[in-house]
Image: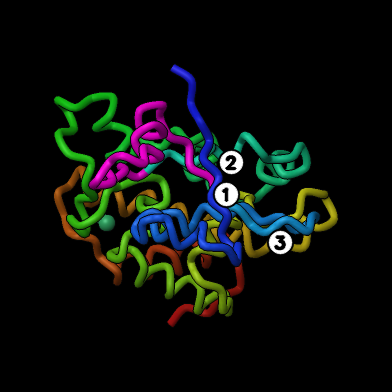
Amino acid sequence: MPEYVLTFIVNSDDDYKDSLPPDITEDLQHWTIPTRNTTTAPTKTYKGSTREYRRFWQASTDVQPTLTPPSAPSPRERMSKHQWHFFWSLTIPHNVRNFWWRLLLNKLPTRLHRHRHQPLQCPTNTCTFCNTAIEDNYHMVVGCPVKQTFWRYVLTLMDLQHDLTTIWNWITFYDLPRNKTGLDQHRSNLTMLGKALTIIWQQHWRSVLGDEPWNDQLAASSFRLLLWKQGNGVVLE
Ligand SMILES: [Zn+2]
């Protein structure tokens, strides 16, 4: 079955944006694809099934169907050769490179993904940490409110003022330079973020497999330990 990419114009002045259900525009906040080299406004894309596409645009439908959180196009589809080289050259733990690589390929074992493919083993697509949202890639990595205290801690340590959408757009290379020189200026930040991803991954599975609640203190101390072991020069509290 073919897939359609619906493109929503974000910075448009016309009424088009207002015609979208608010939950759609909210859900897609992290999928802004920057268009730094063109004058085109940033766009958000959403890869929907034929059925979703048809139902969404059916004018005769009185009640618009609630779309399930969509699968964004994988970062791989737009990453440049230099971005891949940069990714493989980062000094980060081996296990997180695998996690990160799966994120770039849209192959993370999220509940959304597992529920879709193994509904018996994974009977729900709802996040086990917050129990309020569907666990897609974004939610699993940075979007879950339960994990955001840790992310805020990481950003404070890194002295970054950016919001998590920006961090997501860096991790997925959506908002990073496409050439080597530009990428090298982001090396230390991306290395740090890679280490933060290590902790997210470890703590995520520690909680899921060990049936333990998410532990912010443990996540923060594990992150500090990782930085200390790998000589980032961060002073331990
Ligand atoms: Zn959650």
**Picture quarter with ligand 1:** bottom left
User: Which residue is at the front of the view, 8 or 166?
Assistant: 8
The quadrant the C terminus occupies is: bottom left
Q: Which mark is residue 41?
A: none
Amino acid bearing label 2: Pro
**Residue 48: within the magenta?**
yes
For marks 3 and 1, give the one nearer the viewer. Answer: 1
Give the SS element for disc 1.
Answer: loop
Asked if marks 3 and 2 touch (Cβ < 8 Å), the reply is no
Crowd tier of the residue under label 1, counting other residues whose Cα lies within 10 Å: few below 14, some 14–19, many 20 or above = many
Ligand 1 within 8 A of label 3's CB? no
Query: How far apart are the alpha carbons under marks 3 and 2?
Result: 18 Å
Q: Which residue is mark 2?
A: 75
Q: Which residue is mark 1?
A: 172
Crowd tier of the residue under label 3, counting other residues whose Cα lies within 10 Å: few below 14, some 14–19, many 20 or above = some
Residue 10 visible in rendering: yes
Query: How far apart are the alpha carbons under marks 2 and 1?
Result: 6 Å
Crowd tier of the residue under label 2, counting other residues whose Cα lies within 10 Å: few below 14, some 14–19, many 20 or above = some
Q: Quadrant of residue 119?
A: top left
Q: Residue furthest front?
A: 60
Amino acid bearing label 3: His
Q: Which residue is mark 3?
A: 186
Residue 229 visible in rendering: no
Task: Please tell me which of labels 3 and 2 falls first in the chain.
Answer: 2
Q: Residue furthest bottom?
A: 237
Asked if marks 3 and 1 touch (Cβ < 8 Å), the reply is no
Amino acid bearing label 1: Thr
Q: Which residues are magenta?
A: 45-69
**Residue 174: within the magenta?**
no
What is the x, y in percent for residue 81? 76, 37
